[in-house]
Each structure stands twice: as C-alpha cells, then as structure tokens.
Image (cartoon, rainbow, N blue to C red):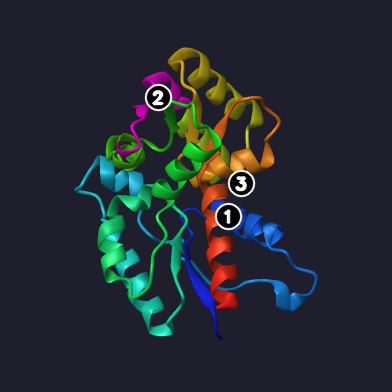
Amino acid sequence: MRHFFSILGGMGTMATESYIRILNQRTPAKQDQDYLNYILVNHATVPDRTTYLLDHSQPNFLPDLLEDVQQQNLLKPDFMVMVCNTAHYFYDELAAASDVPLLNMPQETVKALQKRYPQAKRIGLAATAGTISSQVYHQYIAAAGLTEVDPTPAIQEKINRLIYQSIKEEQGAVDATLYHEILADMMHQLNVDVIILGCTELSLAQELAPNHQYPVADSQSIIADRTLELALKLRQA
C-alpha cells in the first residue's frame, strides 16, 4: 500500500472510533478509491495514562507506545498520528523514535485555536487530571502568549465523571447534560474566552452533543482536519 499513514489509537477505543468516523466523513469521496489509506493501531491494552501520571509507581504507558511506533516504522507510513491528548506527555520520546513525522495534537490545537479565536486570551482546558497535572498543553498555550485556566476541583470531578463513568464505562454513551454543564461552569465560573477539549472522550461528547453555544477548540476534530490535509497533500505528491 502506498501513501498511507498510521493511527496510534485505542486510548480509548470509542474516542478513536469517533476520530475515524469524523475523518471519513470529511474526506472528499465519491467512490471507494477516494478515501484515505491508513492503518489503525487500536492498542486498547495500553496502561491508563492518567493513572501513571498521577502515580509513577503504576505501569508506565511509554514502552507500549514506543513498541507501536517501532512496529509501524517497519511498514514505512508517510506519517503517524496519535489520538490521545494525555499520551502526548511523551511526545518528544515518541517523535524521536519515529522514522516519519508524528503529528502533535496539543500543538495543532493551539495553532487552530489562534486562527479561529484570534481575540481569545484566557484559555480554559477541559482534560483528564493527568493532562492537567503534567501540563501537556502548557508549553504551547504559553508560547502563544495565552493564559491557561485549569478546572477547579469541582469542575474536574465532573469532567472525570463524564470521561470515565459516562463514556468509558458505558461504551461511548454521552451524558449531554453533564457535558454542557461542564462547558457552562468553565465559561461562567472561570471567565474563559474559549475552552480546549483536551481529551478525546470530550471530543466524542462534542460530536454527539454539539447543541450548545459555548466556544470550543476540539482537539480531535482539529487533528482530524490536519490528518486529512496532510494525507491528501502527500497523495498528490
């Protein structure tokens, strides 16, 4: 297979399914052959990212992802994309191990946010506790001259409940009321200009419950657009 890319997914599986669905829906296709060539690595047994980042005595997820990258190197894709925000804690190590470009979801999200919301200054980050504590987004937000605003403990509890109890435990079921409540809390309690959806489960919530008025920068939607742009460009090369 020529001109294909590799997707490092399965963190979690239902969120990865959302990425694939969005990517395919946005591909300009009128016949089978118009869709993109890709290999999906749905590595569902990767240790929980947040569990490790909050407690380094727990299983580290880096070795599993390094193995995935090394396996995909043998297949010679054009590029790789990893559809898990929290896993980007080890982006530098994984990019160094890859023989091809590895797209950077947090970096691409902040770049897209700046274009869509040029007046935004206070950026709310809705994400896993692991992403928040390890500051996965911080360097990109700070480099853009923006202010990162993290959830309060009460809001983080709601985010955790939506990610783990609603979506992960219920196989992709989204509590739309809870999702919209989280967005409202962040906008009104934290006085932010825009909210980054910095977890792919939150991106799934946005896909299935988009009927709200709050400005969001959806990381998975953004990386799907970047994937599509790059794949189509390389196909024409």
Q: Nearer the viewer, residue 201 or 27?
A: 27
The extreme left residue here reads: 57
Q: CA distance from mark 1 to mark 3?
A: 22 Å
Q: Quadrant of residue 64?
A: bottom left
- Is the residue 145 above or below the residue 98 in the image? above
Is 145 colored magenta in this rendering?
Answer: yes
Q: CA distance from mark 1 to mark 2?
A: 27 Å
Task: Identify the residue position indicated by label 1 in the image.
Answer: 225
Task: Please give the label number shown on residue 151.
Answer: 2
User: In the image, which residues are magenta?
Assistant: 143-158
Task: Identify the residue position indicated by label 3 in the image.
Answer: 172
Q: Quadrant of residue 166?
A: top right
Identify the mark nearer the N-term, 2 or 3: 2
Left or right: 166 with respect to 83?
right
Q: Residues within 10 Å of mark 2 (few under 14, many from 20)?
A: many
Secondary structure at badge 1 equals: helix
Answer yes or no: is residue 165 visible: no
- Is the residue 198 above or below the residue 185 in the image? below
Say which residue appears at 53% left-offset and 38% top-offset. Answer: 217
Say which residue appears at 46% left-offset and 75% top-offset. Answer: 78
The kind of residue on which mark 3 rests is Gly
Is 180 colored magenta in this rendering?
Answer: no
- Residue 199 position, x and y percent, is 47, 43
- Residue 222 position, x and y percent, is 54, 49
Left or right: 94 with respect to 162?
left
